[in-house]
């Protein structure tokens, strides 16, 4: 057991895609460097525990255990968390990721293997952030926004679950508006979340789409778009990397 302990406790340094530009040393590393080790059977057991998965705790627990530093992983940017999740999967099992896919052309299912090492990773440019502000293309209103953290993504999911529990599945799903308002610091000086939600519902759709693109497509992170060749119809198509348990 002592020998296994020494083997499983070998950490390696990695640089997060954000390069730490959005952290202050308390909520994440200012230089973007963290030390991680491969998962063990104990971490795999966490993924197999329904109550941890259902409450959204499983991934945070695994990050906390496999990261040498004492940061709270839910405060990491979602972009960094996605990279860390894929990296841990690669060093814990192998970079070969077996998935079952349904062809977008012929609708037939087939199995294939994705090499996680081939995913493109872009690091944050020197001129991007940490303050993020822009001007809306149609209304010309200035706005400021943030990139989502794991904690905020969980808050958005909890909001959606509460809506469904209260009003049922047939209610209008406004979680997208809620998410956008949550990540906005202000639009033309308006910063109350309730007022921002009203404003977003009345802005030109081009402006709303622009805000969401800014939030969802920053110029760094893991490109999870994977090109697949269907063995049945021999057509190429793209999928987003399936992140299953």
Image (spheres, rainbow, N blue to C red):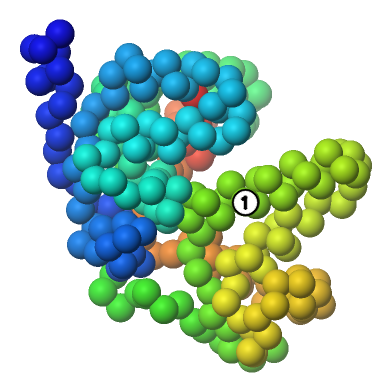
Q: Which residue is mark 1?
A: 155
On the image, the x and y values in percent for residue 169 come to: 86, 39
Residue sitting farthest toward the top: 1
Give the side of residue 85 with respect to residue 147, left or right. left
User: Which image quarter is the N terminus in?
Assistant: top left
Q: Nearer the viewer, residue 198 or 70?
A: 70
Residue 206 seen in render: no
Q: Secondary structure at mark 1?
A: helix
Q: Nearer the viewer, residue 85 or 52?
A: 52
Q: Residue at x 48, y 55 (%)?
A: 149
Give the side of residue 155 with respect to residue 66, left or right. right
Q: Is residue 234 above or below residue 83?
A: above
Give the class, few, some or many, for how many residues have Cα within 10 Å of label 1's Cα (few <14, many ≥20): some
Give the side of residue 137 with respect to residue 128, left or right. right
On the image, the x and y values in percent for residue 204 come to: 76, 78
Q: Residue at x 58, y 67 (%)?
A: 183
Residue 187 position by quadrant: bottom right
């Amino acid at each position: 057991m002592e020998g296994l302990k020494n083997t499983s406790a070998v950490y390696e340094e990695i640089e997060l895609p954000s390069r730490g530009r959005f952290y202050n040393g308390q909520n994440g590393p200012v230089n973007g460097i963290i030390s991680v080790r491969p998962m063990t059977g104990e971490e795999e057991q966490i993924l197999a525990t329904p109550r941890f998965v259902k409450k959204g705790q499983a991934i945070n627990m695994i990050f906390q255990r496999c990261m040498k530093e004492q940061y709270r992983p839910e405060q990491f940017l979602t972009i960094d968390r996605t990279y860390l999740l894929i990296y841990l999967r690669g060093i814990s099992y192998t970079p070969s990721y077996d998935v079952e896919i349904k062809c977008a052309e012929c609708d037939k299912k087939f199995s294939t293997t994705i090499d996680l090492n081939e995913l493109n990773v872009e690091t944050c440019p020197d001129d991007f952030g940490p303050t993020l502000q822009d001007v809306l293309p149609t209304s010309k209103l200035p706005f400021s926004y943030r990139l989502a953290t794991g904690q905020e993504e969980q808050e958005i999911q909890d909001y959606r679950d509460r809506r469904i529990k209260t009003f049922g599945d047939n209610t209008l799903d406004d979680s997208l508006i809620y998410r956008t308002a949550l990540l906005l610091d202000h639009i033309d000086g308006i910063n109350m979340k309730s007022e921002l939600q009203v404003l977003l519902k009345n802005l030109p759709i081009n402006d709303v789409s622009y805000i969401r693109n800014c939030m969802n497509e920053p110029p760094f992170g893991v490109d999870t778009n994977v090109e697949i060749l269907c063995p049945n119809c021999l057509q190429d198509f793209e999928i987003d990397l399936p992140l299953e348990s």
